[in-house]
Image (tube, rainbow, N blue to C red):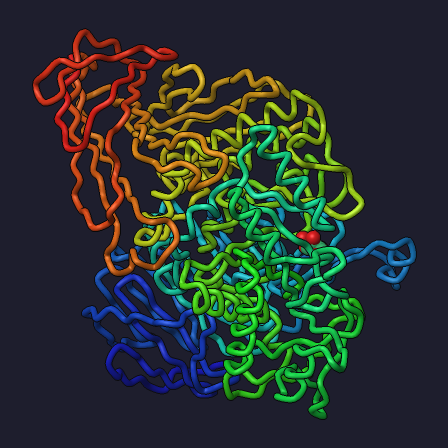
Amino acid sequence: MFGKIIGFEQVDNKIHIGFEEQNVIVEIISASIINFFSPLKREQRLSKAVEDLKVQKCSFSVDSKEDKIIIATDKLNVNIFDDFKVDIYDDSWNILCEDYRGDRKPFVRRGVDGGWAVAAEEGHELKDGDNKLRVQVLKKMEEDMYFYGFGEKTGHLNKKGYHYKMWNTDDPKPHVESFEALYKSIPFFIGLKEKQAFGIFFDNTFESHFDIGKENSDYYYFGAVDGNLDYYFIYGPSMKEVVNRYTDLTGRTPLPQLWTLGYQQCRWAYVPEQRLMEIAKEFRNRDIPCDALYLDIDYMDGYRVFTWDKNKFPNPKEMLSELKQNGFKVVTIIDPGVKKDKGYEIYDKGIKNGYFAADKDNIPYVNKVWPGDALYPDFPNEKVRNWWAENQKIMMDYGVSGIWNDMNEPASFNGPLPDDVVFNNDGIITDHREMHNVFGHYMSKATYEGIKKYTNKRPFVITRACYAGTQKYSTVWTGDNQSLWEHLRMSLPMLMNLGLSGITFCGTDVGGFGFDCTAELLSRWVQVGCFTPLFRNHSSIMTRDQEPWAFDKQTEDINRKYIKLRYKLIPYLYDTLWKQKSSGLPLIRPLMLHYQEDENTYEINDEFLCGENILVAPVIEQGKTARMVYLPKGSNWVDYWTKEVFQGGKYIVKEAPLDLCPVYIKQGTIIPNYPVQNYIGEKKIEELTLDIYPAADDTEIKYVHYQDDGESFEYRKGVYNLYEFLIKGSDDLKGIAIRINKTYRAYRDSYHSFKFKINNIKPAEILADGKAIEFKIVEGAIEFLVESETEIYIK
Ligand code: GLC
């Protein structure tokens, strides 16, 4: 395809290489990130994901030698051969990623003549390989490789042996391992080879394919049906560095409003007003915290977006304000499909200004979604995005607190959008094939910008479809799962891989969307939801009720217990999101992200880390009341419920009756807690509780806690506080010294006191600034109160 190397020229950080058939550019983004580009479709590299490419100046060399060009940075050595074959080594010349020499050799599909048709008669959907890729890169599969990422995909944590397609797809059938595509397309993965990690981000929005040694175990490949060859090689060697660098490229999740970390209740559909109010009342009467309620499509007038059905909701403004007084924020759904309906303002305006995608003859393209005949806004066009952003004002003026963007793959009930539906991508006329995977991305961006402009608060947008980089604008949920144990199980690797793919703020429909939930399934799902970034219970129309109280007293008690625990953990979750702004590390993490040296963690599908310090090993099988838990090597782990300490690097068996989710805290950490509230902001938090798990040696623990107003953008101007807690123990835990420092103060509200809860120690005396203070023993932990900036010594 490329032919022989003719020559090269270096211009700044770019090496232009001429091949007989095609030119390429190799760009040194930093010592650890290299972009490989060939303009197979367009001259320029136009990314939808990388909006602010930061090239880090670094020294590198380029030489040509015999049959190759050698590029060397401080971290990587890259050899480039004829036919644009690329081999990448670390700085000691250990191979990391080698192009496969040779053609694809798919396995044989054995059968009989006409076998496809015969099987199809019974309804079997057989899959053929993909042979239509115009852009394709084959890499040699090394021994002992593991693969992660790929965004929202079914299957296991390790993606070796899978084939995936990136083509945003709304398929309501139960999602199973054979699904190649779901709602989101994030063409990014991480390879792990002999404890060294690297990432590949194939920035191509056309339908793309990733085959991880499935069609032939000698190689893995990625490719697309059209577009440029454009991929970034992102070196680690730690997985954490890969995620950090990938999210530095594509952007990170901005700090959300604090309430969005609270519990959220959704259902298709809480109508009319009286039903919504009833739900709100139940939460408060039953002492179950809740921050957000959702309105699904039936709140609209005939599914016309940005309208209300005034029969069901006679006075939305009044209703939303009443709910707000009681701490409830309401999030309304807004789908992309605009009803074809003369006299309906949004439609009229869209038509008048040419804001809808059109067919090849420039006639606005019509398909069907909830409102019947509907048109698709040309979101890739900035003018249309600005219009959509303006429309958010309609909802904000009513008092809506967040926007839920659904059906934006885009979904279409009347067959798929034809390939040649035309979009205007900020001046470049293109088609559905190129814009499909970024339609939801651009819609979320428009929604985010509109909400930001009209509220000046951190926007809460939740989207179903997305592309790489959507994390800058929106939270995501994993679409229409079902109330199946299998889907609870699957949600863990799916969310962990979403996190590794930059999507920090994600969640599944807790309890399952389709099908009817059971008491036991909801109990176990809430135990998982409690530790996942977005904690939203949602269920479909005509399914059985699924609110926390919908089953029996035991289930309600379990729901209450874990929803309350969630509210205690709010400052820990918020701190983790704040730290993510610089680290890029997600909230839900696979164990190997922190324990890359421990190979036992590489394929753990049924445990996860919530932040760095909480390990969750939920029960995800019906009827099970005990499970095996692997505690990774390199830390000691404290059972959250019993405070028993375990050494890492082994499997233990944990009894887990229905009301108990096995949770372990890394020894040598602090988990900050808030008091339980009915909703975020109900109480003024003047005291922070520090739940401390002292190290068993003299390691110093440092924990940095972040505090701001939890809603505005003032933090970007420096209006926040930082507290540093330093704890140093001795080998036998006989003496512990604690210091609280307020290291940065610019936000007016701060804590008046700190409540210490120190686990697993038996002190004789506690001194605060040299004076003995009183302490109590509560549930085996010692508790005492101190004011800010105190030095404490525990003997
Ligand atoms: C889609 C969404 C689901 C929503 C429903 C009705 O199926 O995925 O969450 O409830 O549409 O709007």
The one of 192 and 381 positioned closer to us in this rendering: 381
The quadrant where residue 59 appears: bottom left
Percent of width and height locating residue 179: 68, 53
Residue shown at the point (80%, 70%) measured from the top left: 372
Would you place residue 26 above or below residue 737 in this image? below
Residue shown at the point (46%, 83%) measured from the top left: 39
Would you place residue 331 above or below residue 742 in this image? below
From where the camera sits, is residue 793 visible?
A: yes
Would you place residue 44 above or below residue 70 in this image? below
Percent of width and height locating residue 104: 59, 65
Percent of width and height locating residue 268: 72, 50
The one of 169 and 763 positioned closer to us in this rendering: 763
The quadrant where residue 212 appears: bottom right
Farthest residue, direction top: 764
In the rendered structure, the answer to whether residue 267 lies left or right of residue 241 reads right
Percent of width and height locating residue 246: 39, 59
From where the camera sits, is residue 268 visible?
A: no
Which quadrant of the figure shows ligand 1? bottom right
Residue shown at the point (42%, 61%) measured from the top left: 98
In the rendered structure, the answer to whether residue 163 lies left or right of residue 500 reads right
Which corner quadrant holds the C terminus?
Answer: top left
| Number of marks | 0
Would you place residue 204 above or below residue 739 in this image? below
Farthest residue, direction left: 770
Residue shown at the point (61%, 88%) measured from the top left: 353
